[in-house]
Image (cartoon, helix red, strand yellow):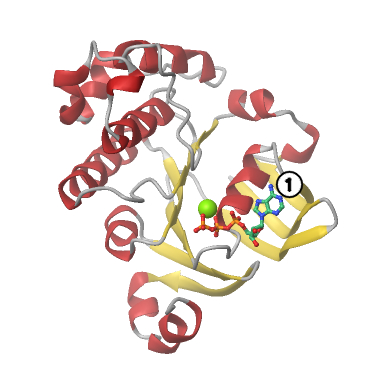
Amino acid sequence: MLEVGQLRALYGDSQVLHGIDLTISRGQRVAVIGRNGAGKSTLLKSIMGGGPSAHGVLQLDGADLRRLKGFERTRLGLSLVPEDRRIFPHLTVVENLEIARHATARGTTPASPEAMIGFFPMLEALKTRFGNQLSGGQQQLLAVARGLLPMPKLLLLDEPTEGLAPIIVEEMAKSINAICAQHGVALLLSEQNLWFARQCTNSLYVLDTGRIVFSGSWDEFDASPEVRNRHLAL
Ligand SMILES: Nc1ncnc2c1ncn2[C@@H]1O[C@H](COP(=O)(O)OP(=O)(O)OP(=O)(O)O)[C@@H](O)[C@H]1O
Ligand SMILES: [Mg+2]
C-alpha cells in the first residue's frame, strides 16, 4: 500500500532525511520512534505533503504522491494528525469532527461524529464545548478522533501522547486499537512514548538523524538493547 523508497527530505538546502525505506501494507500498524529532531515529523510531512521537499519513491497503491497536492493525497485515503493539532477554537467538539467528513477518500463512508465519540468516551461530556475551552489533552483526543473520522486507509499520527496524563494515554491507545482493528485503518505512528507505541503497533522503525537504524518487531527490538542504548537514550 504505502511504499517509501530512498526518501530524502530537505528544508531549503538543509537535508533532514537521508534515504528512508519503509513499507506499510493494508491495515498494518507501525511505529517510528527516535529522539527529538531525529526526523519523525519530517517523514510524516513528506508523506502528507506540505513542508519539506521530498525526493525518492513515495507511492500509495501505486500512485505517485509527489505529484499530488495535500488535498489530493487526502482523497486517496491519507490522514495526518499533525504535531500542533490544529483544533478549530471557535467550533464545538462535534463541529470539529463534522468538518473532517470533507477529508473522506473517494468511495469511503466516513464515521459520524457520534460514532467517533463512541470510540472516545472522554469526549462525550464535551460535545458542545468550543475548541478553545478544551484542555491540551482533550484537544489531542479530539484531534485523533477527527483524523480517524474519514476512515483513512492510512493514519499518520504525530506524537499524539506528548504531555498527556497517563489515563488519557491509556484511553487513546484503546480507542485507536478498536477503530483500526474494526475498520482496517493502517497506522504510521511517530512516538517517543514506547509504552504507547507498543500498545498501538506490531512493528517499529528507529530513526536517528534522518536514517533508519533498526526495523523489526517489538520482540526483536527487546532483544536488541544496544539499539535502545545507542539511538534512543538521551
Ligand atoms: N521547517 C523547518 N525548517 C528547517 N529545519 C527544520 C524544519 N522543521 C524541522 N527542521 C529540522 O529537521 C530536523 C528534524 O526535525 P523533525 O521535526 O522532523 O524531528 P522529530 O523527530 O519530529 O522531533 P520531535 O520529537 O522533537 O518532534 C531537526 O534538526 C529540525 O531542526
Ligand atoms: Mg516531531
The quadrant in which the N terminus is found is top right
Q: Nearer the viewer, residue 151 or 156?
A: 156
Residue 168 is left or right of residue 211, and the answer is left
Residue farthest to the front?
Answer: 133
Residue farthest to the right?
Answer: 13
Residue at numbered disc 1: 52
Instruction: Judge whether 84 appears above or below 95 on screen.
Output: below
**In the image, residue 160 lies at what x, y percent?**
38, 45
Q: Residue at x 44, y 89 (%)?
A: 226
- Beta carbon of the mark 1 residue lies under 8 A of ligand 1: yes
Q: Residue at x 42, y 85 (%)?
A: 229
Q: Nearer the viewer, residue 70 or 152?
A: 70
Instruction: Judge whether 114 appears above or below 178 on screen.
Output: above
The quadrant in which the C terminus is found is bottom left
**In the image, residue 207 lies at what x, y percent?**
56, 68
**In the image, residue 119 lies at what x, y percent?**
22, 29
Count of number-bearing discs: 1
Q: Nearer the viewer, residue 216 or 98?
A: 98
